[in-house]
Amino acid sequence: MEKNRKLMKNLVDISVMVTQSTNFFEIKDKIVDKMLEVIEPTKACINLFYDNNFKNAYLVCSSTLDYIPKMFPKNSRIGTKLDFNESYPEYIHEAVRDKKIIYVENIFEDPKAIDERELAKMEGYSGRIVFPIVLNYNVIGFMTCFLTEEDSLEEQEITFISSVVSLVALSIEITLENEHTKELIDKLRESISNINEVTTKLHLNNDVNEFMNSLNTQAQKLTKSEEGFIVIDDLNYDYKIFSAIENKKRKKINFQKILLKLHEYEQNGGYVNDANYMIINEVQAENYIYYKLKEGNKLLGCIICSNNSEGYTQDDLNILELISKQIVLGMQLYKYNQSETKHKLIANELNILNKQQKLIMNESEMNLENNKDLYFYHRCATVIGGDFYHAQPIDENKVAYIIADVMGHGIVSNYIVAMIKGCFKTLCYNYQTAADIMNKLNQILYDEFDKMDVFTTCIVSIVDTKNNTLDISNAGHYCPIIIDDTGNISTENNLCKKNIPLGVLEDTKYEHSTISIKSSAMICMYTDGIIELKNQHKEEFGIERLEQFLLKNYKLKKDDFIAELKKELNEFAAKHNFDDDILVVCLSNK
C-alpha cells in the first residue's frame, strides 16, 4: 500500500512538471530522476526519432548512465545521434515496430540480446525493459530502464513507468506545439515586416509590379512552395500576372482554367494536398494552396502556391490570407495613387473657387452713411457653398445687396453664384427698385437655370441712408428680422412680400416693399442653414432662437456680435462642422 502511495505521489509530481513546462529538454532529466526515486532500477535513458526517420535514434537523456555516455558522446545539438539499425538489439526494434513493452530479464541468457552483452558488462546491468513512446499513434522514441541482478520490477511498477512514458510523450507534444507556435509567430513577424516595407515602397513609387512580385515571393517562401503566382483579373486593374515561376514557364500556365476552378469553390481559401494537377505543361502540382483576392464581394483574382514537399496546413492558409488582404489593400492604394494627381488638381481648383467666393463676399462689408454698418457671417458646409451675399454701392447714399441660397453645392453652385453676381452688379446701376432688379435677374438667368435644373431663393435690398428706407424684393426667401431701437421685434417684418424662387417660372412678376429704418437698430437677413441647424436631440435652431439671440446681442459691435454668434451655434450643435451653409447678414447701427 505504501509502495502504491509513493508511486502515485511521484507520478503526480511528474505530471506537474510536464504541465508547467513548454520545453521537454529542460525537464527530461528531472522526470527520469523522479521516476527512479520509487522503483528499483537506478538507470534509465530516453531515445527519440525525429521527423519519422527511424534510421537514427537520438540519445537525449542519459544522465543516470556511466559507460554509455562516454562511449557515445553527444554529437548533435539535439542529442547523441546513433545508427538505429546497428546500435540497438532486435528486441528494441520489435518494441518500436509493434508499439509494445518488451522486458528482457536476463541479457546474458536471452538470445535476442546476444549482441548487447559486452555493453551490459561495461554499463553494469543484466536486464532491460523497453517502453515505446507513442504520440498520435506514431512511435517517436523509446525509454529503457536498466536492471541489475538484484533489481526486479513488479506489475504495478511497470504500469507506473508506462504512465511516466505517456507523460514524456505529452511533454514532447507540448514542446513541439510550442516550437510550432514560435515558428509561426516568427513567420508572421517576418511576413508583416516585409509587407509593411513593400507597402511603404508602393506608396512612395507606385510600382505595383514590384509590390506584387515582392508579396508573391513572400507567399512562396513562407508556405515553403516551389511555385507561386498572383493573378489579377479585373477591369479596374487590367489583367495581370505576377509569378514566382521561371519566365520561360510562365507563359504556359493556364490561368483562366485555374480561375474558373476557384470560382467553383464557395470558400475564400483552401488547400489540397493530393491534387496531382497539371497547372502548367512542365510543372506538376502535387498539392496547392490558394486564397481569393476580394474587394467586398467582388472577386479580383487569386494568389496560388503549389508543391510544398511537407504538405500544406491551416497555418499556411492563415499566412496566405494575411498576404491576400495586403494585396487587395495594395491594389486599392495603387488605384488611389493613380487618381490622386487628378484629385489634387480638382481640389486645387475648388480651393481657388472657394477663395474667389470669399473675396466676392469680403468686398461686401462696408461702413455706410448715417452711422450704419453692413456686415455678414458666412460658414460653408463644403469647399464651395451655395449661400451667397454681395453688396454693391449705387451712389453715396444707396447700397444694393443680395442674399441668395442656390439649391446645391460645389462647382455648379459656384457657377450660378458667379452669374448672379455679374448680373446683379450691372443691374444695380440701371434699375431703381429691388423689384426691377429681381425681375430682370429672373429673365436673364431663367434659361441657364432651366438647363441646369436649379433654382435659387434670394432677397434683393436697396438701403437708402439719406431717407432711412429699405426697399426689399423677396424671391422665396426668409423675411428679415428687424429689431427696433427699443429692443423689440418690429412689425415692419410683415411688409416683406414673398414670391417664388428665381428660375422656377420665366414670367414671374416680383414685387417690392419699402420700409422705414429710422427707428431700426438691426435688420438681419439669413439663409435656411442657421434655422435648420440641429443639435444632438434633433431639435432645430429655428427662427425663435435666432430672434432671441438678436434681441440679446443686437447692441454689440460687429466683431463681438460675430464672435457671440459663432459661440452660440457651436454650443447648440455641439460640433464645429455643420451640414449646411450658414449665412447671416446684418444692417445695424454702429
Image (cartoon, grey):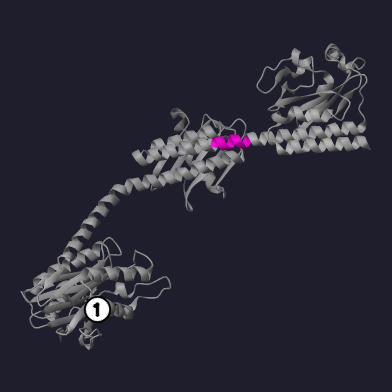
| Residue 254 visible, this orientation | no
Against 249, is 441 above or below?
A: below
Residue 230: percent from the left, percent from the top?
Answer: 47, 39
Front-most of residues 151 and 243: 151
Residue 157: percent from the left, percent from the top?
Answer: 89, 31
Q: Residue at x 26, y 65 (%)?
A: 385
Question: For the residue marked with disc 1, what is the amino acid?
Answer: His
Q: What span is colored magenta in the figure?
A: 180-187
Quarter of the rendering occupied by the N terminus = top right
Front-most of residues 283 and 134: 134
Residue 420: percent from the left, percent from the top?
Answer: 17, 69
- Which element is circle 1 on? loop
Q: Mark 1 sits on what residue?
A: 477
Q: Is residue 111 left or right of residue 17?
A: right
| Residue 532 visible, this orientation | yes
Q: Is disc 1 surrounded by few (<14), some (14 to 19) or many (20+) residues within 10 Å?
A: many
Quarter of the rendering occupied by the C terminus = bottom left
